[in-house]
Image (cartoon, helix red, strand yellow):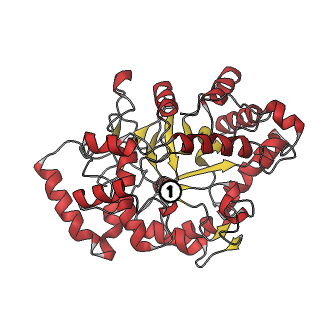
Amino acid sequence: RRAPPTSALSPPSHTHPRDTMRSLLLTVLLSTPLATSAFLGCGTASLRPAPRLAPHLRGGGGLPNFRASAGLNCPTIQLNDDSTHPLLGYGTYKVGFIPASASAAAGGAEAAGGTEKTARECVKEALDVGYRFLDCAQFYGNEGEVGLAIKDSGVPRENLYLASKVWTDKIYEGRAAVREQVLKTLKDLQTDYLDLYLVHWPVPGFHVEAYKELEKLVEEGKVRSIGMSNYAVEDYKELKEATSIKPTINQIEVNPFLYRKDTIDFFQKEGVQIQSYRALRDGKAFQDPTVLELAGKYGKSAAQILGRWCVQKGIIYIPKSVKRERMVENGDVFGWELEEGDMGKLDALTTQEALQAFKDLYIKCVVRDTPLAGTEEAKKLIKTSITVG
């Protein structure tokens, strides 16, 4: 699908004089706004699948199965369909628009609707900074604005990695509604194909048929890779038995305060890569004593510690900010690494209470915004015995 790279950087985990010099140069570049995109850019036009490694070397600690995009400081990770995926992206949730049923809005913490900057402005700035993977979704309510930002940026389509997701209402409505939504996303983003499309939640009794429609869209060339979001191990097993194209991705919440090791290990062993959302916990963990201790030790920000923890586990990292300086800061997670003992300190921050809260949220959200919500039928359909950890 894509032209071969003209060059490739060594994985950041390998120390080399050239890497040391690059790190020093990046420090200088970070203080130079005009050079920001050269530091952070994650273009995909020159990407090509990395050579496959032995199964026991994939996933887990470190970044064993990736190569860097040509001439840029953003590694890519190989998917099971032989495509490549940038390890760093820009999240567009609550960028310029807050969905009415978003958890924070529902709790009164934020007002649904507009925010201080438009999505068009924020995404254009992220593209100017150098982000090339944009994580979008029907639910985010801003794909039209994202499409305008892409047009404003002048970045060629072949240099972008565009991903989106279909929401629970359309999943419930059936295959025709899923198809209609994909076509709407294509129109809104002003493109004729998507690099990746996911089923946003495994709506019980409906998610398998939604995925089957995505398989048809792959055959038609409208979508290149497909996958899942918020799937438990048990949801994946149900899907796998009934479909023919293996999911490439499972997007779930991943951070040191919700580290579901058993689930992550399972999917990585299956060859399904993990995308993380809330990797930075919306800034709520920036004052955690362990995070601050490590930030001081490495001379990094709390966000960079959390982001590096994520990518060091081979997990695709999707930070979000509406501030340009934070966009740059969030992307500085390559070219250095956390010591094994410090990774362990972060791993240990997940509590049983956090895992139980995750399970409660899963049970609520798999039927959210569907007629099943709050019904006896939902109680019969929803999986309650799922792999939580």
Above or below residue 33? Residue 201 is above
Q: Residue 240: give x, y in percent of width and height.
A: 64, 24
Which residue is more in the foreground, 40 or 384? 384
Please tell me which residue is depicted at 53% across the width and 71% down the height of the picture.
Answer: 122
Residue tagged 1: 281
- Mark 1 lies on a secondary structure that is helix
Q: Amino acid at mark 1?
A: Arg
Q: Residue 358: give x, y in percent of width and height.
A: 61, 43
Please tell me which residue is depicted at 38% across the width and 29% down the height of the picture.
Answer: 58
Q: Is residue 209 left or right of residue 127?
A: right
Q: Residue 331: give x, y in percent of width and height.
A: 37, 59
Above or below residue 67? Residue 158 is below
Which residue is more in the foreground, 347 or 133? 347
Above or below residue 161? Residue 131 is below
Q: Is residue 220 left or right of residue 31?
A: right
**Residue 311, visible in the rendered structure:** yes
Tell me the quarter of the picture where residue 10 sits: top left
Q: Is residue 328 left or right of residue 115?
A: left
Tell me the quarter of the picture where residue 95 sits: bottom right
Category of crowding for the residue at label 1, using alpha-carbon neighbours closer than 10 angstroms: few (below 14), some (14–19), many (at least 20): some
Tell me the quarter of the picture where residue 151 sits: bottom right
**Residue 331, visible in the rendered structure:** no
Which residue is more in the foreground, 120 or 292? 292
Please tell me which residue is depicted at 80% across the width and 39% down the height of the picture.
Answer: 175
Count the labels in the image.
Answer: 1
| Farthest-out residue, left | 17
Q: Is residue 151 left or right of residue 142?
A: left
Q: Residue 196: give x, y in percent of width and height.
A: 58, 45
